[in-house]
Image (spheres, helix red, strand yellow):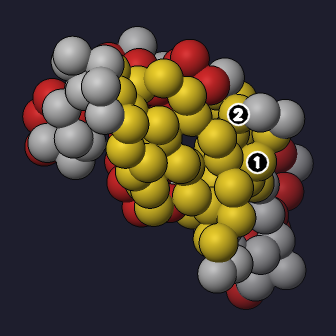
Amino acid sequence: MPAEHREIVLSVPEIIVALVILSGESGILPIGRIQSLKITEKNGGIVAVLTITSKAGRKKVEHEVKAEQLGAALIRLCESEKVPLARKAAKRLARHGEGLALHLDLTEKRVPLNSQLSRDAIETNARAAF
């Protein structure tokens, strides 16, 4: 059974761009300037902790972005950058250094070669060849 395993690695600046793109579409981030982003694990899941300052620079806010929103942001970035992603692939996030890796696993189901259909086809082709 063939399988495809891909890993798309994104740096902190790329993750910030992905979050800004998604936030522009859905408003998931507070208004302000992102000063830093740190990837952590919380309750068994990946979380990004952003430090955002107000436009005037007087107020700092820490904002958490959960794995589901991170995944959506990374997928949206891949779409905008024309990086192909299989829709049917199982997707998961993992820490990769300071950044993230988007893992894609795609396994295609196939009929085993030892099935009756395959034996009949082999026999028919063998008879035709002689």
Query: Residue 18 placed where, x, y %?
Result: 40, 28
Please tell me which residue is depicted at 21% across the width and 41% down the height of the picture.
30
Question: Which corner quadrant of the image does residue 58 belong to?
Answer: top left
Amino acid type of the residue that numbered disc 1 sits on in the rendered structure: Arg
Of the pair 33 and 119, the residue shown nearer to us: 33
According to the image, label 1 marks what residue?
Answer: 95
Mark 1: give few (<14), some (14-19) or many (20+) Cα within 10 Å.
some
- Please tell me whether residue 3 is drawn above or below residue 86 in the rendered image: below
- Please tell me whether residue 10 is drawn above or below residue 106 in the rendered image: above
Q: Which mark is residue 24?
A: none
**Outermost residue to the bottom:** 116
Query: Residue 2 placed where, x, y %?
Result: 77, 54
Label 2: which secondary element:
strand
Amino acid type of the residue that numbered disc 2 sits on in the rendered structure: Gly
- Left or right of residue 10, residue 28 in this image: left
Residue 120 shows in this picture? no
Q: Which mark is residue 99?
A: 2
- Please tell me whether residue 107 is drawn above or below residue 24 in the rendered image: below
Query: Residue 112 placed where, x, y %?
Result: 77, 75
Of the pair 102 and 104, the residue shown nearer to us: 102
Please tell me which residue is depicted at 40% across the width and 13% down the height of the picture.
81
Q: Are marks 1 and 2 in contact (CB under 8 Å)?
A: yes
Question: Which corner quadrant of the image does residue 22 belong to?
Answer: top left
Quarter of the picture holding the N terminus: bottom right
The Cα–Cα distance between marks 1 and 2, rounded to whole angstroms, is 6 Å
Of the pair 58 and 105, the residue shown nearer to us: 58
Of the pair 117 and 17, the residue shown nearer to us: 17
- Left or right of residue 1, residue 71 in this image: left
Query: Residue 41 placed where, x, y %?
Result: 70, 64
Please tell me which residue is depicted at 64% across the width and 81% down the height of the picture.
43
- Left or right of residue 89, residue 80 in this image: left
Label 1: which secondary element:
strand
